[in-house]
Image (tube, helix red, strand yellow):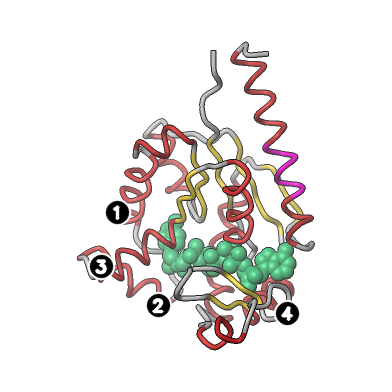
Amino acid sequence: AKAEPLKVIISGAPASGKGTQCELITQKYGLVHIAAGDLLRAEVAAASENGKLAKEYMEKGELVPNKIVVMMVKERLLQPDSQQRGWLLDGYPRSSSQAAALEDYGIRPDVFILLDVSEDILVERVVGRRLDPLTGKIYHLKYSPPENDEIASRLTQRCGYAHIIKMWLLCSLYIKISQSRHVNGNEAKEHVFAQIDAALTHVGEQRKVNSGSV
Ligand code: AP5
C-alpha cells in the first residue's frame, strides 16, 4: 500500500522563521502550504465580513477569534489538493482551543515542528524583515537581502516589535502543552532546514515501514 501524503504542522513565535522554512519545505516535499496568516490576509483583502472583523484584531497584534480562524483552516485542509499532496500548516494552532478543534475534526499531523528561537534573535528578525508585496517573498535586510534595487525599492515592513512580544506570550502558552519536535531555529536558514529535513525524512521512512511498502 502507498503511504498517505504527509501532514505537517510548523509552529513558533512570530518571526521565528516559519514562512522562510515553509518555502524550503514545499520546494522539496511538494506539500500544500497553508498559512493561517495568509488566509486571514486574503479575507481582509477581499473585504469580506470575516475579513473586516479579522483586520481589527490583526492590527492590534491579537489573535483573531476562533469562530473565524478554525472553520477557515479546516476548510482549506480538506480541499482536494491538500488531501492529495499532503499539507504543511503554518501559524495554526496558536492556542490549546485551536488544537482541540483540529482534534475534534479528526485532523492530526504526522509531525509537529516547533522552531525554538531566542527573544533577542526574534527582535532582530522583526526589525530587519521586509516583504515584497508583488511576489509575497520574505526578505531580511541583513540575512536575506533583496536581489536588486528594483525589488529593494518596493519592500514593505509588516509589523513591529510590540506585536511580536504579544504574540510570543500567546505562543509560549501553547508550546507548554504541546507534544512537538523541537528544532533550533537560531541558526542560519539552511541549517534550520537541515534539521527539519532530517525530521521529515525520518517520519516518511517510518510511515513507509508502517504501511508495509518496504
Ligand atoms: P502570521 O502571518 O502567522 O504572522 P507571524 O506569526 O507574525 O509570523 P510571520 O509570518 O510574520 O513570521 P515567520 O515565523 O513566518 O518568520 P519569517 O519567515 O517571516 O500572522 C499574522 C496575524 O494573523 C497574527 O498576528 C494574528 O493576528 C493573525 N493570526 C494568524 N494565525 C492565527 C491563528 N491561528 N489564530 C488567530 N489569529 C491568527 O522570518 C522573519 C524574518 O527573519 C525574515 O526577515 C526572514 O528573512 C528572517 N529569517 C528567517 N529565518 C532566518 C534565519 N534562520 N536566520 C536569519 N534570518 C532569518
Q: Quadrant of residue 171?
A: bottom right
* Residue occupying image coordinates x 53% and y 82%: 155
Across and down, in percent, residue 3 comes to 56, 21
Percent coordinates x, y for residue 35 in the rendering: 46, 55
Dividing the image into four quarters, tell me where ligand 1 lies. Answer: bottom right
Badge 4 density bin: few <14, some 14–19, many ≥20, Cα 10 Å: few
Find out if the beta carbon at label 2 lies less than 8 Å from the nearest ligand 1 atom: no
Which comes sooner in the sequence, label 3 or label 2?
3
17 left or right of 4? right
Report whether the residue tagged 3 is closer than 8 Å to ligand 1: no
Q: Secondary structure at mark 4?
A: loop
Q: CA distance from mark 1 to mark 2?
A: 18 Å
Q: Which mark is residue 67?
A: 1
Q: Main secondary structure of the magenta part?
A: helix
Q: How far apart are the two marked residues, 4 and 3, measured between alpha carbons?
A: 33 Å
Secondary structure beneath dot 2 equals helix
Q: Which residues are magenta?
A: 194-200
Q: Residue at x 64, y 46 (%)?
A: 113
**How far across and how far down the image is residue 19, in percent?**
57, 60
Tell me the distance, in whole angstroms, between the alpha carbons under discs 1 and 4: 38 Å
Taking 37 as reference, is 207 above or below it?
Answer: above
Q: Amino acid at mark 1?
A: Lys
Residue at the image position 61 percent from the left and 73 percent from the top: 139
Residue situated in front as seen by the camera: 201 or 119: 201
Any mark on residue 38, and which? none
Labelled pair 1, 4 in contact (Cβ < 8 Å): no
In this figure, which residue is indicated by the disc labeled 2? 59
